[in-house]
Image (cartoon, rainbow, N blue to C red):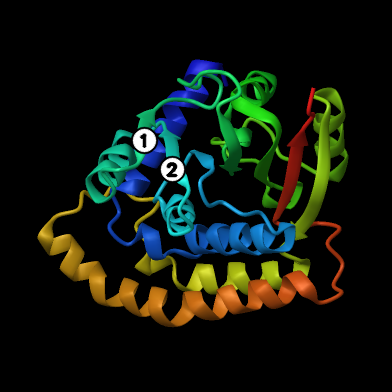
Amino acid sequence: MSGDGLFATNLSHYEKLYADPFERRSFEVRSKTQIFKSLQSQQKEVLNGKRVLDIGFGSGDIILAVSKQWADCYGVEIAKTATASLKKRCPSFHIFEARAASLPFKSDFFDIIVCSHVLEHETSEAAAIREMIRVLKPGGTIFLGVPAVAVGETELHARLYDPASIQNLADTFHLEILRSHAYGSRPFQIIYYAISAIAARASTHNTTVRFSKQNVVRYGVIRRLYHSLVVPVLLFLYRLDAIIPISKRKPIEIWVILRKALS
């Protein structure tokens, strides 16, 4: 698929996704926020007073978590639905409609960048990484999350990742890997996909449903039960899965903390 075609496919998908009033409570959103908080805690990264950029903030949960730690919050997204929603909810945030490969900021501006499940959607991985490095201060860190090979190819992805490709990326752009962690062992994947299949009728992520008051009422009860009862169980299992000694040879996702050189 061409670069323009890939972008158009992703834009259409995510405009629809973020129009879903239940998306913020999904496992996908909450697990990313959970992982970021865990890695930040392990790294002992203090955010107070720092400029933090969330690339592809989506439903906004990570940037909201960052704001509670007194950081100066910036975010970019391609979906107008997401940018409009976050601007309305958090008018003090600096929110822009932009792509990872073309960031509207001056060089050496941010202390920390969060890029969660965005890089795989960019046609030019190199352009996106160069832009992150450009706007990041020397010695600044990037919290990078990407899908692993076990996820399987989709029309939304330009590529998937494994430990070797992550190491190659770091070597190519002279970034130091401070931390690396794989998430989603094979046993967890079986549980997750089984539950997801059962809950598929309650999800509208892959349909063309236009949300109206009637639709929200129709799906509301089932979705609320799923997000309030099932998703917390999945999140607990994901946390447990991340710490027990289960093989991560074929994980769902890989997260790394990368540091830009001081000079």
Quadrant containing the C terminus in the rendered view = top right
Asked if residue 137 is positioned above or below residue 23 in the image, the reply reads above
Number of marks drawn: 2
Side (left or right) of 161 relative to 200: right
Q: Which residue in the protein does label 2 denote?
A: 73
Mark 1, other Cα within 10 Å: few <14 / some 14–19 / many ≥20: some
Query: What residue lies at 52% left-to-right and 41% top-to-bottom?
Result: 52
Q: Earlier in the sequence, mark 1 or mark 2?
A: 2
The percent position of residue 36, horizontal first and vertical second, equals 61, 57
The amino acid on which the numbered mark 1 sits, given as a three-letter code, is His
User: Spatial distance from mark 1 to mark 2, Cα to Cα?
Assistant: 6 Å
Q: Position of residue 193 (x, y in %)?
A: 60, 67
Q: Which mark is residue 94?
A: 1
The circle drawn on residue 251 is none
Q: Position of residue 101 (x, y in %)?
A: 56, 21
Q: Secondary structure at mark 2?
A: strand
In which quadrant is the N terminus drawn?
top right
Q: Is residue 31 above or below residue 178?
A: below
In percent of the image, x 70 and y 71: which residue is there?
A: 188
Residue, x 52% and y 68% (percent of image)?
Answer: 196
Which residue is painted at 57% across and 73% down in the image? 235
Name the kind of residue labelled 2 in the image. Answer: Cys
In the picture provided, is 22 more to the left or to the right than 74?
A: left
Instruction: Say left or right for 117 vs 172.
Output: left
Instruction: Verify CB contact (< 8 Å) between mark 1 and mark 2.
Output: yes
Q: Is residue 233 visible?
A: yes
Q: Secondary structure at mark 1?
A: strand
The answer to whether residue 251 is visible is no
Q: Position of residue 135 (x, y in %)?
A: 59, 24
Identify the image quadrant of residue 181: bottom right
